[in-house]
Image: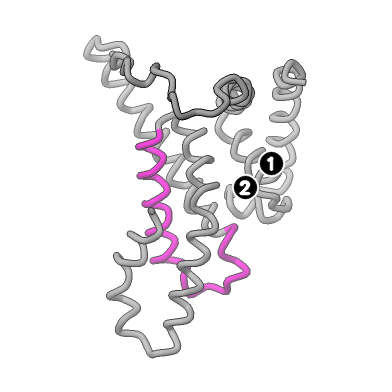
Amino acid sequence: MPNVLVLHADRHRMDSAPAQATPRVGALDRFLRAVERRALRIAELSTRDREDALELVQDAMLGFARSYADKPESEWRPLFHRVLDSRIQDHHRRASVRRRWRVWFGRHGEADGEDPLEQVADPADPDPFARLADGQTRAALDGALRALPLRQRQAFLLRIWEGFDVAQTAQAMRCSEGSVKTHLSRALAALRPRLEALR
């Protein structure tokens, strides 16, 4: 799991600290375990690639542990999402540069072939039809979220999915509260017609 890597990477720093730092390490470990699944989901929606998402979450956890572990625990969630948002923004900037280079050299998005084994049904699946319906709903929701511009998607995920208030979301996104409201309003307006079909 990503947070285990974070704690091992920074353990040497905390081992030299006084004995009272041990509860802090435990609190940090619990916090990272609590946020890792949702952070991975946010990163996956932003990158469309699980491996890239795992790397971003690990990097965000390392950056958070190094920079903010000494902050009060009540501030950890928005600060962690601020670090994650920064890593996602960096990922998109790097991807944009790579795309420009490919276009410059005449390579227009060479895609890897699909793995035929991924298409084989799992015989141990007790109810493949129910899973298909759930999978289709999830795919439609993922598609709708991925179609949003990055800032709108981040505002939606932090406000609606993570349950942050406007101030926490603004802190995580490094923008004004008014910008958060605007991004969220536009995201909801774009999502509403696409998700009506799922009812």
Please name the residue shown 70% across and 50% down the image.
Answer: 163
What is the residue that sits farthest to the bottom in this orientation? 19
Q: Is residue 39 left or right of residue 49?
A: right
In the picture, the disc for residue 120 is: none
Q: Which residue is mark 1?
A: 179
Give x and y (percent) for residue 47.
44, 32
Mark 1 and mark 2 in contact? Answer it, CB < 8 Å: yes
Residue of label 2: 175
Instruction: Say what secondary structure mark 1 lies in.
Output: helix
Q: Is residue 17 left or right of residue 151?
A: left
Real-space Cα distance between discs 1 and 2? 6 Å
| Near-viewer residue (90 or 146) | 146
Q: Position of residue 84 (x, y in %)?
A: 48, 49
Of the residues shown, which amino acid type is indicated by label 1? Ser
Residue occupying the point 37% across, 52% down:
59
* Residue 23 horizontal side relative to residue 115, left or right: right
> Does residue 52 sit above or below 164 in this rendering?
above
